Amino acid sequence: MTPWNPWNWEIFLLVVLALLALSLIILGILTSYFGSGKSRAVGIVLLIVGIVVGLVTVLGSEYYWHAGFVQNVVVATIYYVIAAIIGAAIGLLVFLGAIMKT
């Protein structure tokens, strides 16, 4: 009997790529909308690279061709983003509380 291993490198890599694609798409949209000149061009490039990375992540995944992609990667990515926001907010509040007390 093999020991239970909760770590899966493929899902880890897919979640990292999905988060990269999501952040590039959001930052590309914001940069191309609010930027001017070269910044707008960089924003468009970021947007295109984010879309390409997202498509490669989805279509290149073994999980996409099975039923597990949405459950194992998309839902996990959403949970990780929410957890990262909560963790960053708590850290920021602790930092601000420490600064305000001094």
Image (tube, grey):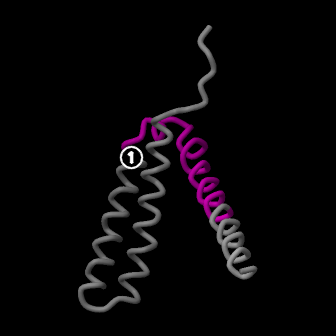
Q: How far from the left and from the top, in percent, is residue 82?
A: 65, 60
Comparing 39 with 29, the one in front is 39
Above/below status of 81 relative to 38: above
Residue 81 location (% of width, % of height): 59, 59
Residue that badge 1 annotates: 59
- Quarter of the image for residue 48 reads bottom left
Q: Give the residue at x 31% y 76%.
A: 44
Please tell me whether residue 60 belongs to the stretch shown in magenta: yes
In the picture, measured across the screen, residue 57 lies left or right of residue 68, that is left
Q: Locate the N terminus and report the quarter of the image it occupies.
A: top right
Image quadrant for the C terminus? bottom right
Q: Residue furthest top?
A: 1
Part of the protein shown in magenta: 59-86
Say what amino acid the circle numbered 1 marks: Leu
Residue under the point 71% across and 69% down = 94
| Residue 27 spot, x, y in % from top left | 42, 74
Is 64 part of what is drawn in magenta? yes
Residue at the outermost bottom position: 36
The correct choice, above or below, for 78 with respect to 95 in the image is above
Q: Main secondary structure of the magenta part?
A: helix
